[in-house]
């Protein structure tokens, strides 16, 4: 058995400038400076993340649409060329194999981006399903670097580097674009709640030349982004920004026992689709008949830092368990998410989180956990 951890094309840069830790089978930077500073750079300026550990697959062939409609829960047929959609890949019981981003770059050509931790599982699942149809599933992870540029000044930086007005590229689009002389796909998506993009940098194989190209693009971001207050960001800020935005994380809010309806990500599932995707009937039943658990968000009233797998109580009775938690760098309050029995608590209700044997009060609330007039992609301030 090979226990050696994988490394992205940017590993040498991370090792020199940051703290590298094992993550999902990869050696990845957890931080370069203070995690809070990196977090606030994303909220107030621009942060860049190496996300090259994520599995990137090309799906192509005459049956690609039918294939993808079978293995993903959104409506693939409505996806225009150069469009993208958030989706899930489900098992027969409606549980979630993984969540993913799907981009259409041609009539019969798609890009599938999925979590590193589930890469082997998803790869095997798709290869098995592809046997039935005229479609190819190609792993391009080690040919392409992937970098997320996120924050209110991210699009200004990308406009400067590409010479293009970013207004040309709407949210959830994916377009070929030359950025600072590098061939890329600019995907107007992200995992922080802020404006920005996830950029696929082409022709970056795991060779000395490929690594130099990836590091060259990364350095261009940092050099040209200096005037915008850019900061390199690690896994710590990636998790804190996604938590603050109220986004699900596989292994926490999503797993093979949890459906998208239970996770309250209904935008990832559609029901007027043909053929029906794997798990369709169960998910439709959850939508029509109800669920046995549902995701909630909460903000701590009492002092305490919530983490995963802490009991949630209401009127002294345990009603569920936390899945993610931490401190919001914006409010300096504890925030978290979890699953509870449905139809028991509503927004504004006071619950208790059992933090190491001490019951701490929290208020059930909607996500995101920040003032959307001041922060996030829809900010007005």
Image (cartoon, helix red, strand yellow):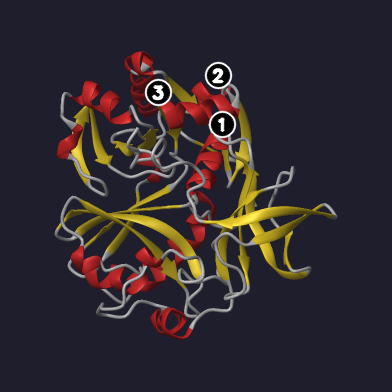
Which one is closest to the eye, mark 3 or mark 1?
1
Q: Residues within 10 Å of mark 2 (few under 14, many from 20)?
A: some
Label pair 1/2, CB-CB below 8 angstroms: yes
105 on left or right of 41: left
Looking at the image, is 328 positioned above or below residue 338? above
Label pair 3/1, CB-CB below 8 angstroms: no
Which one is closest to the eye, mark 2 or mark 3?
2
Q: Position of residue 272 (x, y in %)?
A: 26, 78
Residue 320 versus residue 323: which sits nearer the camera? 320
Q: Residue furthest right?
A: 357
Residue at the image position 50 percent from the left and 28 percent from the top: 40
For marks 2 and 3, the one nearer the N-term is 2
Residue 321 versus residue 91: which sits nearer the camera? 321
Q: Residues within 10 Å of mark 1 (few under 14, many from 20)?
A: many
380 on left or right of 359: left
Looking at the image, is 311 positioned above or below residue 180? below
Label 1 SS: strand
Q: Which residue is mark 2?
A: 17
For marks 3 and 1, the one nearer the N-term is 1
- Where residue 135 sits, quadrant-wise, is bottom left
Residue at the image position 48 percent from the left and 46 percent from the top: 245
């Amino acid at each position: 058995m090979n226990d050696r951890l994988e490394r992205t094309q940017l590993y040498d840069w991370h090792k020199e400038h940051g703290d590298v830790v094992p993550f999902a089978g990869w050696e990845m930077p957890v931080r370069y400076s203070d995690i809070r500073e990196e977090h606030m750079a994303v909220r107030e300026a621009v942060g860049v993340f190496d996300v090259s550990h994520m599995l990137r697959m090309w799906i192509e062939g005459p049956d690609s649409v039918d294939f993808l409609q079978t293995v993903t829960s959104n409506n693939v047929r409505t996806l225009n060329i150069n469009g993208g959609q958030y989706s899930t890949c489900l098992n027969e019981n409606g549980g979630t194999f993984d969540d993913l981003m799907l981009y259409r770059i041609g009539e019969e050509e798609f890009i599938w981006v999925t979590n590193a931790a589930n890469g082997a599982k998803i790869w095997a699942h798709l290869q098995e399903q592809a046997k039935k149809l005229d479609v190819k599933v190609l792993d391009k992870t080690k040919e392409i670097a992937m970098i997320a540029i996120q924050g209110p000044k991210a699009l200004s930086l990308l406009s400067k580097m590409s010479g293009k007005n970013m207004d040309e590229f709407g949210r959830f689009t994916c377009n070929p674009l030359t950025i600072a002389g590098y061939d890329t796909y600019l995907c107007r998506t992200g995992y922080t709640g802020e404006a920005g993009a996830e950029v696929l940098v082409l022709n970056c194989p795991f060779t000395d030349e490929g690594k130099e190209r990836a590091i060259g693009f990364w350095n261009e971001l940092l050099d040209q982004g200096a005037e915008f207050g850019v900061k390199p960001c690690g896994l710590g800020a990636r998790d804190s920004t996604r938590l603050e935005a109220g986004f699900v994380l596989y292994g926490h809010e999503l797993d093979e026992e949890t459906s998208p309806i239970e996770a309250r990500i209904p935008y990832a599932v559609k029901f007027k689709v043909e053929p029906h995707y794997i798990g369709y009937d169960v998910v439709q039943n959850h939508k029509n008949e109800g669920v046995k658990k549902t995701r909630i968000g909460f903000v701590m009233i009492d002092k305490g830092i919530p983490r995963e797998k802490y009991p949630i109580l209401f009127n002294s009775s345990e009603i569920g368990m936390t899945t993610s938690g931490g401190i919001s760098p914006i409010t300096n309050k504890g925030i978290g998410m979890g699953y509870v029995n449905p139809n028991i608590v509503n927004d504004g209700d006071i619950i208790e989180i059992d933090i190491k044997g001490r019951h701490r009060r929290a208020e059930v609330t909607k996500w995101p956990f920040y003032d959307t007039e001041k922060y996030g992609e829809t900010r007005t301030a």
